[in-house]
Amino acid sequence: MKGEQAEWDIREVSVIPMKEDERMVILYATIVLDGKPMETGNMFFDTFKKREEGWKLVRSYIETGVSVGGTDLKNDL
């Protein structure tokens, strides 16, 4: 995308409490090119744990090529 008018569109889908000191954050990210979002994007499933120094990422899973049109997410995004 170098040299193009591209930007990221990142949306919070959900924050899920796992344990008292752990949260899973689900994000959807896609590239917007010339004002139009791509047909697919990436879903990030990131788990954070609270430590003395603050929240730290402990696990991450990424699903690529997710089409919002084919999921229930289209209502929220």
Image (cartoon, grey):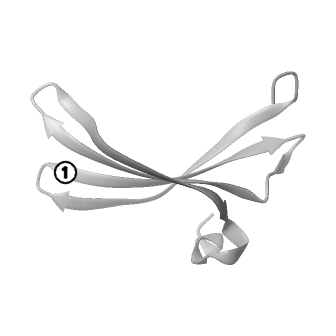
Is residue 77 or residue 59 the one in the foreground? 59
**In screen coordinates, is 38 left or right of 64?**
right
Instruction: Give the answer, above or below, for where 47 lies relative to 6.
Output: below
In the structure shown, which secondary structural element does the residue marked by tag 1 occupy? Answer: strand
Q: Is residue 6 left or right of residue 34?
A: left
Check the picture and name the quadrant holding the N terminus: top right
Where residue 12 sits: x, y (%)?
50, 53
Q: Residue at x 78, y 44 (%)?
A: 32
Image-based side of 52 in relation to 28, left or right: left
The x, y position of residue 37, in whole percent, is: 79, 51
Disc 1: which residue: 22
Residue at 69% x, 66% y: name it.
67
Residue at figure coordinates x 15%, y 24% from the top left: 53
Residue name at image x 58 percent, y 68 percent: 76
- Is 35 rendered above or below residue 77? above
Where does the C terminus fall, quadrant-wise? bottom right
- Percent x, y of residue 72: 59, 78
